[in-house]
Every structure is written in structure tokens, then in C-alpha cells.
């Protein structure tokens, strides 16, 4: 299919995105519900749907243990869903940028051309092909590095299999692990830590940024300045990752990290800061963290990764624009400027709307989640459950996959709400982004203007 | 001082607002720290500052029991601070509307003239005078009704005193009570419930709306349609109050209301729905509520009352504009329309910015509050404290005054954070609103535009 066909809306990209995800989830659900997919009794249809959605939306929340409850076949279904889910979201979100770029300025087109190694992107197939090669190359490198850890531990077959599974899961920011305690056994293992964090980061920066960065490093002589988008992504990601790690370390060094060496503590803090930005592995029992630390992780999870990547959340660029916009409003400036460039006002308004829409949806979902889980909570333990479910909902919506243990307590209605949250957080926000970027055909109704009081 | 002087910015209204509140809080702190202000040992300076800020910002959070710890003199200081705090916020927020109205359209001016009983508002003194008469009239009516309850119970002196105190506290949405359990003893007492709810509602709808409504009811023959502002306030308030009450009733009828009659349950549900919208009295022990119900109350508290009133929060109109804006974006319409009128796009952007700024401030404050309270929380009880402190922070920021018990556990740093939150939630947001409404003189710096990816 040609990109131009998409633009002429023979098939709206929003519709294509939803169809792609729904089809994959439906197929995955059927396959995971087969007796062959599990080691013990077959999964209920709801659990199969939950697992398929979690894998396809690269979330990583689990109602069954991937390593011990699923058979090899079941695990492979999960792995394939993760891979096509990750590829899908990358492709569609790069498409969104092309969309934006073509319409609002020439700059977007330039970045696409520049980053796609100077090949003009004529068709969806070309774009998908380039993204595929890029993905497989990084995942292969990750597999080799992880195999150095796993093969000596488990032998060739299991070692390679574990390396592939975790490399794909890490790069796609899916957070599915074959170990029941995620990566907690490797909390202070440098090679595992470094490899997984590198895969998560490359998967979370976004295809265009990594390509642009790669070209920038390669062409040392004829260097152009990086695009605003890439600089914004790199700065925001660096600040969030390092700042988050530092704060986790400071908050927990007298609390849950007490008794560990400073080096071990740093590994734990850096990894948890990286993984909160929608990867969803963990190398530490999060329920030991203080509520202040968990609140910090809620922020990191909500902000999430960068657009055009496998990661979820509100996105680094949205948050950067949000802060720049609020700062400019406070200074009384009508323009939103960041890193010496001005963001088009239309884009600022859209970003603010998207962030607020997400927050409204999330708040409403948390309320309903608490309400449907109400009968399963004894009266005494009420207050404890609030943080658990807020964390669970944010984790699902931002497709992070970290949990304080609420997943195990979900009733049927609770599972359905989390399924919807994972889907909406992954597919819905991007579809809405497509929709609000779309140009309207019909003339909208406009009434007389009238002021009201605010503030 | 003439309004025109304010507009010419001989004194910026934002600066005047801050000075007015800071002066009153400083004076109140000194008076409350005097030995004469308390029955036992004098208040510490921090507790005096906390109490003065809470009273002046009509919040109602208390670190000392107003009825038993403060002397009559101390209680009168609190009462005076509530009254000048409530009058101040009403005056300044009506000024903000005049500001808006004069600049953006003629409609605002029309509403002011219409509502101020056809008297042209020439000076700040006129405006203040009209607001003062309006306030005293309603508070007097409330006092008479409450005296019917309190005088038979406590005799003339105490009865009248309690009636005055609670009428002022209710109309100003302050939530200070002389009973240690707020109004819990009157949970199913019809006259107290009705009077207090009426006072809260009149105080929360806003001066202009009540005036316009009064004129509308009086001039039955020459009726004009109510202004968009008034219709928006009335619709949003009605939906929130009734919807909130219904949901509290449904959620709690099988939980904390179990064992009470349906009528008692309804009184409790309606009162808690009304009071959450920044009044801060309670007729029920909120810690018995389920987290889902408390989440609902968090929303109600955050939304709060209407602009131009004594109430706090994000304001009903902001929320209405927010929802209208999000709906119009989802439908792909560039205009935000509501009740068959279009809101100026500039005002929509400002509203979205104000709401997001408030949420960012609130989120950051909750994090810092949790962090400074960290050492006082034993490791085991960690999770319980999250909801307590989130509730406390929202309550302070939206100047509600409801608490699940965290106020009593605040250390010095925690008290300071709550003091700042009360001040910023009350004075800060309005100042920011003035600032972003203000026209800029100097030409702002504008860089080249460049798109980035969002979503
Ligand atoms: K994930
Ligand atoms: K209050």
C-alpha cells in the first residue's frame, strides 16, 4: 500500500492500526486458549485474552506465569505477539510523524529521508522493511550478549532460547520474562543489566532518533545539527533516566537498599529508573519501595518512552512540550519555545489536549477498577489497595507491566478493565493522535462566541 | 482605587491579591501565637501559621482543634480570617472576570452590569460594597436558621455564637467547625443539613451567578436568557452534586452505610457530595469509605466550586471547558462549543494550561509530601499512607479541608508543604490566571518553528 493511499484515506491509518491490533489479539487469544499452549489446565478465554493483549500491546502484565504455566508453544505465541506488536507500534507511530511532517512542514519529510539512510520512503512496505532490518539487527546483537550470560548457566538450547526471548522482550519494551521473579536474580549482574538497559533504551528512543543518531556518528565530517525532535528526545530521556535513578537511590538508600553495597544499590536504582519508562522488567521487589519512590515511578511510567518507539506512556516529547508551554504561559509569552526552536501553536494545543485526555481516561479507569474490585477487598485492608490499583492502572495504560501485586487479585471485571486500559493506552492514544492530526473535510459548526470565568 | 487604575496596572491585581493574603496571614499568625489565643499552652509559631493560612485560605485543615484548643479570642481570629479570606477571594475573582470581560468582549461587562442590580461598577469600593452586603445578608439568614438548631441545645449565648460561626464558615466554604467531629452528630438532622448545604452551595456558585439568578427569578416578565457562564455553572454544579451523591450512595450502601436507613444514607451521601466540592465539613467518618468512594471524592474535591465564589479547586467552568474541548478534538472540530455557544479558542488554551499546571504542581507536591513524611512512616505501614497523603494534598490544594487523618501525622516539613499548598491552591492559581490573562507589552522572542513527534 502506498503512503499516498493512506493520505488519501482509502484506509484511515487509525482504522488500520485498530484492525491490525484487534486481529492479532484475536488470533493470539485463540492460540493461547488451546490446550497445547499451557503446561497444566488450558487457560480460560479471559486469561488467554489478557495474555494476548498484554503481549500484543507490549505491556507485560501477566495473570499466568510465562515461564512455568505456558508451554513452549504458548511462550512462542507470546514472543511472536510481542514482536509484531512492537513492530506495529513503531511503524504506525513513524507513519504518524510522516503524516505530521508532510502536512505541517518540510522538516518532517527531511528527517524521514535523512534517517532512512537517504532512501526516499515511497511505500509502507519500504518503511516496514527498513524498520524490520533495524529491529532484527539490534535484537540479534542483544541475543549474542545475553547468550554470554544464559548459555553457561543453562546450556546451549535453553541458553539461546532465553537470550532470544529476553532480547526481543527488552527491545520491544514488553517486559515479559521467563523467570517468575522477572530479572531479580540478576540485580547486580553487570552484563545482564547493561545489555537489557541498552536494549530497552534503544527500543524506547524511537526508530527515527536512533537512525539519525547513527548517521550523525557515522558522518563525522559533514555533520548537521540533529533535528529538534531528536535533541528533545535525547535530552528528556537523559534527564529522566539519570534524575530518576539518582532520586530512587537517594530515597531508598536508607530504606529498601539498606544492607546492600553502594554499587549494588546504584545498579538497582538505574535499572528501575530505566525499566519504569515502559519496559516493565524489574530487578528488585518493588513492594519494598517507599510510597514516595513509587510515586516517582508512577511519574516515570506515565511519561514513558519516546514516540516512534515500542515504548508507551505519554511520551518524552509531549512532556517536554507540556513543560515548555506551561513555562511560556507563566512568562506571559504566546509562543512555546524549546531548545531555541518554536513549537507550532497548533501542535502545542494538541499535545495539551492529548495529555489531558489521557489523564481523564486514566482517572476514570482507576475509579472503575477500584469499584469493581470493591467486593474482593475486605473492609480493613481498604487503604492498602489504593496504591496497588493506581500503580496497576498506570502500568497498564502506559504499557509498562510493573505491578505491586494487584494483577493476581483481579476479578473478571477487573481483568476486563485492565485489558481495555492496555489496548486504549497502546492503540487508542495513537488513534486519537491520528484523528486530531487529520484534516477535517466538512465545515464545523460554529456558534457565537461568549466568555466565561475560569480560574 | 478605580478599576481603571488596576487595568492601567498602577498595581497589578495579582500583586494586590498576594499582598492582601500575605498580610492577613502574617497578622493572623501573630494573633494566634499569643497565649490569649489558646486554652492550654500557646500555639507554636508553625501551628499558628498553619491555622492562619488554613483560615485565610478558607481551607479548613486543622492541626489544633478549633473548639477545644483555641480560646474564644483565638476562635474569633479564625472567624475574622475566614470572613476576610472569603470576601477577598470573591472580590478578586470577580475582578478577574471584569478583566476578561472588558478585554475580550462586551458580554462580560453586560453581565457585571446586569448582575450588580443595574448599577454601573465604577470602582473597586462599589464592587466590594455590593459583595459585602450580599455576603452578610446570606450569612445572617443562615445564622437565623442554624440558631433554631443550636439555641435549644446550648442556650442563647452559645447557640447564637455557634450559629454565626458555622454560618460564616459554611458560606465561605471554610469548613472550620467548633465540634471536634465536624458535623457528624447532625448526620441525619434535616434542618442543619439543609441550611449548611444551602450556605455551601450559595457560597460555591459564585457572586455573579447568584445575583443573575436572583434577578432572573425576580423579573419574571422581562426574562432574558441567563449568561453562558451562569448556565454552565448551574448545569455543571447540578450534575456534579446529584451525580456525586448518587454514586456515593450506591458505592457505600452495602459498605459503610450498611445498617442505616435509606433516608439517613441519602442525607449522608448528598451532604458528602456537596461538602467535597471545597466546603470541607463532614457529617460522616470518611475513613470508613471505600477507596473507590474516596477516589470519587478526590475528583469532586479537585473540580471544586465555581469561579467568583469562596470555593476552591479547578472550578466547574474549567472542567466543563476541558470536557467540551476534548470532545470537540475527538470529533475533529477546531471549535470548542458548549450549550450552543463557542468558547474563544484563546480561553480554551488558557484553561487547558491552567488545569495541567495545577495537576503538575499537585503531583509534585504529593511526591515531596510523601518524601518528607517518609521517616515518620514505619516500613510495614507504607502502602496505607499513600491514599492518606494524596487525599490530604488534594484537600489542601483545592482548599477543601477534608482529611483522612494525615494532618495529625504531619511533621514540621509536612506542615510547611501543606501550608504552601493551601496558599498556592488559593492565591497562586488565581494569580497565574491574572498573569495569563494579562496582555504582554514587550514583543516576545520567537524562534523558527519546527515540528516534533507527539503521541
Ligand atoms: K512493557
Ligand atoms: K474549605
Image (spheres, coloured by chain):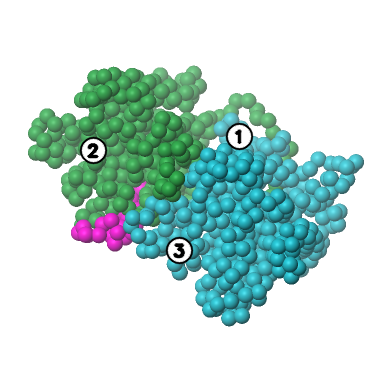
Chain colours: A cyan, B green
Going from the N terminus, do you reach mark 1 or mark 3 first?
Answer: 1
The secondary structure type at the circle numbered 2 is: loop
Give the CA distance from mark 2 to mark 1: 45 Å
Locate residue A367, reporting x and y percent. Answer: 43, 56
> Label 1 marks which chain's residue?
A
**Whether residue B258 is situated above or below residue A230 in the rendered picture:** below
The answer to whether A309 appears left or right of B199 in the picture is right
The secondary structure type at the circle numbered 3 is: helix
Q: Residue at x 41, y 23 (%)?
A: B22
Q: Give the residue at mark 1.
A: A328
Locate residue B320, reporting x and y percent. Answer: 45, 48
Q: Quadrant of residue B316?
A: top left
Instruction: Report the magenta residues as a range.
Output: B233-262
Q: Give the residue at mark 2.
A: B180
User: Few, some or many C-alpha atoms within 10 Å of disc 2 (few <14, some 14-19, many ≥20)?
Assistant: few
User: Few, some or many C-alpha atoms within 10 Å of disc 3 (few <14, some 14-19, many ≥20)?
Assistant: some
> Label 3 marks which chain's residue?
A
Q: Residue at x 18, y 35 (%)?
A: B163
Amino acid at each position: 500500500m502506498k503512503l499516498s493511499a493512506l493520505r488519501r484515506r482509502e484506509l484511515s491509518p487509525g482504522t488500520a492500526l485498530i484492525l491490525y491490533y484487534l486481529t492479532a489479539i484475536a488470533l493470539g487469544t485463540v492460540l493461547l486458549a488451546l490446550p497445547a499452549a499451557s503446561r497444566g489446565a488450558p487457560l480460560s478465554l479471559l486469561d488467554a485474552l489478557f495474555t494476548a493483549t498484554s503481549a500484543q500491546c507490549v505491556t507485560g502484565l501477566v495473570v499466568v506465569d510465562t515461564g512455568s504455566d505456558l508451554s513452549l508453544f504458548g511462550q512462542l505465541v507470546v514472543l511472536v505477539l510481542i514482536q509484531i506488536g512492537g513492530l506495529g507500534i513503531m511503524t504506525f507511530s513513524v507513519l504518524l510523524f510522516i503524516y505530521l511532517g508532510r502536512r505541517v512542514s518540510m522538516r518532517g519529510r527531511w528527517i524521514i529521508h535523512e534517517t532512512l539512510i537517504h532512501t526516499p520512503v515511497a511505500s509502507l512496505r519500504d518503511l516496514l522493511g527498513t524498520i524490520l532490518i533495524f529491529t532484527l539487527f539490534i535484537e540479534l546483537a542483544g541475543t549474542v550478549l545475553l547468550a554470554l550470560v544464559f548459555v553457561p548457566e543453562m546450556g546451549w538450547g535453553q541458553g539461546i532460547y532465553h537470550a532470544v526471548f529476553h532480547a526481543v522482550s527488552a527491545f520491544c519494551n514488553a517486559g515479559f520474562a521467563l523467570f517468575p521473579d522477572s530479572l531479580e536474580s540478576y540485580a547486580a549482574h553487570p552484563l545482564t543489566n547493561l545489555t537489557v538497559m541498552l536494549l530497552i533504551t534503544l527500543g524506547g528512543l524511537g526508530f527515527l532518533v536512533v537512525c539519525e543518531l547513527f548517521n550523525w556518528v557515522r558522518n563525522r565530517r559533514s555533520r548537521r545539527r540533529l533535528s529538534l525532535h531528536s535533541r528533545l528526545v535525547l535530552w528528556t530521556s537523559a534527564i529522566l533516566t539519570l534524575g530518576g535513578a539518582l532520586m530512587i537511590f537517594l530515597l531508598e538508600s536508607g530504606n529498601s537498599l539498606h544492607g546492600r553495597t553502594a554499587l549494588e544499590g546504584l545498579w538497582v536504582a538505574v535499572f528501575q529508573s530505566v525499566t519504569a519508562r515502559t519496559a516493565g522488567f524489574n530487578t528488585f521487589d518493588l513492594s519494598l519501595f517507599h510510597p514516595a519512590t513509587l510515586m516517582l515511578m508512577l511519574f516515570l511510567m506515565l511519561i514513558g518512552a519516546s514516540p516512534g518507539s515500542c515504548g508507551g506512556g505519554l511520551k518524552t516529547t509531549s512532556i517536554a512540550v507540556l513543560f515548555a508551554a506551561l513555562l511560556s504561559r507563566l512568562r506571559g509569552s504566546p509562543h512555546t519555545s524549546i531548545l531555541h526552536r518554536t513549537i507550532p501553536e497548533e501542535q502545542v494545543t494538541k499535545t495539551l489536549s492529548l495529555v489531558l485526555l489521557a489523564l481523564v481516561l486514566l482517572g476514570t479507569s482507576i475509579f472503575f477498577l477500584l469499584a469493581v474490585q470493591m467486593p474482593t477487598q475486605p473492609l480493613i485492608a481498604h487503604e492498602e489497595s489504593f496504591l496497588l490499583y493506581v500503580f496497576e492502572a498506570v502500568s497498564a495504560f502506559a504499557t509498562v507491566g510493573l505491578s505491586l501485586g494487584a494483577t493476581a487479585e483481579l476479578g473478571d471485571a477487573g481483568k476486563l478493565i485492565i485489558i481495555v486500559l492496555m489496548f486504549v493506552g497502546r492503540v487508542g492514544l495513537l488513534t486519537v493522535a491520528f484523528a486530531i492530526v487529520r484534516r477535517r473535510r466538512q465545515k464545523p459548526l460554529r456558534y457565537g462566541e461568549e466568555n466565561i470565568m475560569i480560574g
